Image: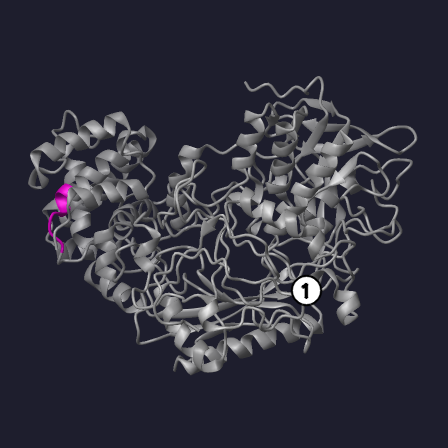
């Protein structure tokens, strides 16, 4: 049985082995510090990835990472149900085991929404502060990209790997975009376009989400391996139950965690990094309430769990006479960020040209109610001519969107589960309508009748959990300072998308990684 | 169209079977020396399934696969060998399910399933509601036939390049055919310097975007 007893001496205890925690752990271990990482979920075997692909494709076996059940229970109380477990993963690597792997920088405007547009709030740091860390994060994630996006914020060096070239489907869209004056450009991807010492090149399994069997797609396991190689200890299947502080309430002293065999241990450390994502991080703080902090740790502001926001999906699609060769790969090769900085309405938006529109032969076959020659006719009819566009639309932070504890329901350790309060406002709906309008214009320009749209009425989240432990300079209005250290507790650092004061409309993981690199630098200096 | 050993290996790969594993590799290597015509056909002593079960499995494949395919027997047997060799629990479940299907045939048609003509096999499977059953590893026979037999056969075919090719894609989901299979040879993005002002649409200082690192081959600007 694995040794899950505490580390006798630790400079740093990191809670969570997703990208934020793993990057911090790797960099601090490589700097010579004693690091222990406590991960709630299991360590997944590399060799089982193709089996996970297999089971994902088969009806009824779509969730390969074991999410769900009492361990991951949650409740909804908002206007809209939020499917929390659809894309998050508890395990070594965190949700990067499942993620799509799109890695864009936020724009300059995202850090200054209040100053520029009078909405949301400003970040306490700006793009220039984060810019060198974005470059470092792109190296950490081996990002494949090209400097061909005229709407991207300024950058100082080429991407680590060349971009994936545009697809046949992109070539079809290009005609319409040129007519309409839309600029298509490459997509920065956290997947290897070429082999490196760390990972092989993508071989096109086509199942990036939820599993990449080849290892070409970045997962935080890479940084976990680096951390362990540098001497860090990573303990899996040990959900942290609470954090405790000293008598004065100034510093954390220990993390209490449960083991699979029913034991409870405490891990002490000089510094604590909580990196459990935008839902579990605030939940752990709320679960750790004390006499000194009756509303939860680091929550003097009352902002822990508040301002929960996500990106919303808008989409439209149809079929064309032309061959579009969908589903050769599970990622996109072209986007359009042309409307991102627009101010009418003030809603960030990025447009995606999907390479995975419509069905694939194997999934259609496994769900069909026929076979033989009849099935083949159906497959030949249904495959290869689909076209679809997606979009991510910004949701500005609102206090009433929040994560709370639901004391009426408990998880497998008897702790109240997260309760999600989530709703959309008119500004977000306007952004979704605008995305739909552009998408249908592109399809119409191609002569394709939109056969489906996803817009304000039926949109869903992109599973980017942000805002719930926001960063700021005012201790009365924010949870962490610009260093990502909590205002209340000197040695408690929160790293992840929960610290984003606003979330823009770009996929958040590159910003998570950049903030993690930056926090690791600050921690190194403190240690 | 003829199914080959390469197709069976691709199907095994997609199904998560480590074809490089010693035992499977030995079996498949043996079949290679025999050639595709005798592909993977093992004796009863060494096969994962007995002769009757293998015949039933191939007989189902002849129904659920398109009629234009040749080489079904070798493809199915090689795939099945690889799939079941390392998974004793699955092997038992597949054997039991095939045996029960054969019993149904003997009861309804008074002969083994493999002895029926393909139209009658098709009819029997549909009367058993295998076509509409929810696949599942346990429970009633139709769901298990769908799960262990029909869907595994369909998976083996349509996650392979040959099956994908029949449907229109040489690199179906589940097959590692390389990301370049999706490229449009006629369309690659040109340098932004050739197509547009890199500071267009910006409201900040805009660093020059001339250090492109694309591997595009040049050609017409793509919008």
> Quick check: can you spot residue A215?
yes
**Going 59% across and 77% down the picture, which residue do you hit?**
A434
Q: How far across and down, in percent of the image, does residue A395 sit?
A: 68, 64
Q: Is residue A436 left or right of residue A405?
A: left
User: Is A243 above or below relative to A519?
Assistant: above
> How many circles with numbers are drawn on the protein?
1
Q: A178 or A381: which is nearer to us?
A: A178
Residue at 39 percent of width and 62 percent of height: A166
Give above or below for B133 relative to A263. Answer: below
Q: Quadrant of residue B99?
A: top left
- Out of A495 and A457, give the one closest to the viewer: A495
Is residue B177 highlighted in magenta?
no
Tell me: A160 left or right of B94: right
In the drawing, does residue B148 fall left or right of residue A141? Answer: left
Q: Quadrant of the C terminus of chain A?
A: top right
Where residue A503 sits, quadrant-wise, is bottom right
Q: Say above or below: A42 vs A164.
A: above
Residue A39 showing in the rendered view: no
Q: Which residue is mark 1?
A: A395
Task: Give the extent of the magenta segment.
Answer: B69-74
Query: What colouring method underlies this structural image?
Result: one colour
The spot of residue B49 in percent (x, y) is 20, 32
Q: Residue sitting at 14 percent across and 47 percent down? A: B72
Q: Residues within 10 Å of mark 1 (few under 14, many from 20)?
A: many
Question: For residue A414, which quarter of the picture?
Answer: top right
Image quarter hosting the N terminus of chain A: top right
Residue found at x 62% / y 21%: A4
Q: Position of residue A443 (x, y in %)?
A: 44, 78
Residue B73 counted in the magenta span: yes
- Is A432 in front, or is A81? A432
Q: Position of residue B65 (x, y in %)?
A: 19, 54
């Amino acid at each position: 049985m694995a040794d899950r007893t505490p580390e006798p001496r630790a400079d740093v205890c990191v809670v969570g082995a997703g990208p934020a925690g793993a990057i911090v752990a790797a960099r601090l271990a490589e700097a010579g510090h004693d690091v222990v990482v406590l991960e709630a979920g299991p360590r997944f075997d590399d060799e089982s990835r193709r089996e996970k692909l297999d089971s994902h494709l088969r009806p009824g076996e779509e969730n390969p990472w074991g999410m769900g059940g009492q361990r991951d229970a949650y409740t909804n109380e908002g206007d809209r149900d939020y499917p929390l477990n659809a894309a998050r993963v508890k395990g070594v690597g965190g949700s990067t085991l499942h993620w799509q792997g799109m890695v864009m920088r936020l724009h300059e405007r995202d850090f200054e929404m209040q100053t520029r547009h009078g909405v949301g709030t400003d970040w306490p740091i700006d793009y220039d502060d984060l810019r060198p860390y974005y470059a470092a994060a792109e190296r950490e994630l081996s990002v494949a990209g090209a400097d061909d996006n005229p709407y991207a914020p300024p950058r100082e060096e080429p991407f680590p790997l060349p971009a994936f070239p545009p697809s046949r489907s992109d070539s079809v869209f290009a005609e319409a975009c040129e007519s309409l004056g839309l600029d298509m450009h490459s997509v920065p991807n956290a997947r290897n376009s070429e082999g490196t010492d760390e990972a092989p090149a993508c071989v096109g399994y086509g199942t990036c989400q939820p599993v990449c069997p080849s290892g070409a797609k970045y997962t935080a396991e890479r940084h976990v391996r680096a951390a362990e190689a540098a001497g860090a200890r990573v303990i899996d299947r040990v959900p942290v139950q609470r954090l405790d502080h000293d008598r004065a309430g100034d510093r954390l002293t220990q993390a209490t965690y449960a083991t699979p065999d029913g034991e409870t241990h405490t891990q002490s450390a000089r510094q604590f990094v909580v990196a459990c994502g935008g839902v579990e991080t605030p939940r752990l703080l709320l679960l750790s309430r004390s006499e000194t902090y009756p509303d939860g740790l680091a929550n003097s502001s009352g902002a822990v769990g508040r301002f929960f926001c996500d990106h919303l999906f808008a989409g439209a699609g149809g079929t064309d006479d032309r061959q579009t060769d969908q589903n050769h790969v599970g990622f996109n090769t072209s986007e359009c960020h042309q409307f991102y900085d627009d101010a009418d309405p003030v809603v960030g938006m990025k447009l995606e040209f999907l390479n995975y529109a419509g069905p694939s032969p194997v999934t259609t076959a496994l769900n069909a109610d026929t076979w033989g020659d009849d099935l083949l006719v159906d497959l030949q009819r249904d495959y290869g001519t689909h076209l679809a566009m997606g979009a991510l639309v910004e949701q500005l932070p609102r206090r009433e969107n929040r994560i709370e504890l639901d004391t009426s329901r408990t998880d497998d350790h008897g702790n109240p589960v997260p309760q999600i309060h989530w709703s959309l406002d008119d500004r977000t709906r306007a952004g979704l309508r605008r995305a739909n309008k552009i998408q249908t214009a592109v399809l119409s320009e191609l002569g394709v009748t939109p056969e489906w749209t996803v817009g304000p009425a039926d949109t869903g989240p992109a599973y980017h959990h942000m805002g719930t432990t926001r960063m700021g300079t005012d201790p009365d209005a924010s949870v962490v300072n610009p260093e990502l250290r909590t205002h209340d507790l000197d040695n408690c650092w929160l790293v992840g998308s929960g610290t984003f004061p606003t979330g823009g409309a770009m996929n958040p993981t590159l910003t998570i990684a950049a903030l993690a690199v930056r926090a690791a630098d600050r921690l190194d200096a403190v240690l | 169209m003829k199914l080959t050993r390469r197709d069976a290996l691709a199907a095994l790969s997609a199904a998560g079977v480590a074809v490089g594993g010693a035992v499977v590799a030995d079996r498949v290597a043996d079949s290679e020396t025999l050639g595709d015509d005798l592909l993977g056909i093992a004796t009863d002593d060494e096969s994962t399934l007995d002769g009757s079960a293998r015949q039933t499995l191939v007989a189902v494949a002849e129904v659920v696969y398109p009629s234009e395919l040749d080489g079904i027997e070798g493809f199915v047997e090689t795939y099945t060998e690889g799939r079941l060799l390392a998974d004793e629990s699955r092997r038992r479940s597949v054997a039991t399910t095939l045996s029960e299907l054969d019993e149904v045939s003997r009861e309804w048609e008074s002969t083994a399933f493999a002895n029926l003509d393909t139209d009658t096999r098709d009819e029997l499977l549909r009367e058993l509601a295998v076509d509409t059953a929810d696949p599942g590893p346990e429970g009633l026979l139709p769901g298990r036939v769908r799960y262990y037999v029909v869907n595994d056969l369909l998976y083996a075919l349509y996650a392979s390049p040959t099956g994908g090719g029949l449907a229109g894609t040489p690199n179906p989901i589940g097959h590692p055919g390389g990301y370049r299979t999706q490229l449009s040879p006629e369309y690659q993005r040109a340098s932004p310097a050739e197509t547009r002002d890199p500071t267009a649409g910006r409201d900040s200082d805009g660093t020059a975007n001339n250090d492109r690192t694309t591997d595009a081959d040049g050609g017409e600007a793509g919008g």
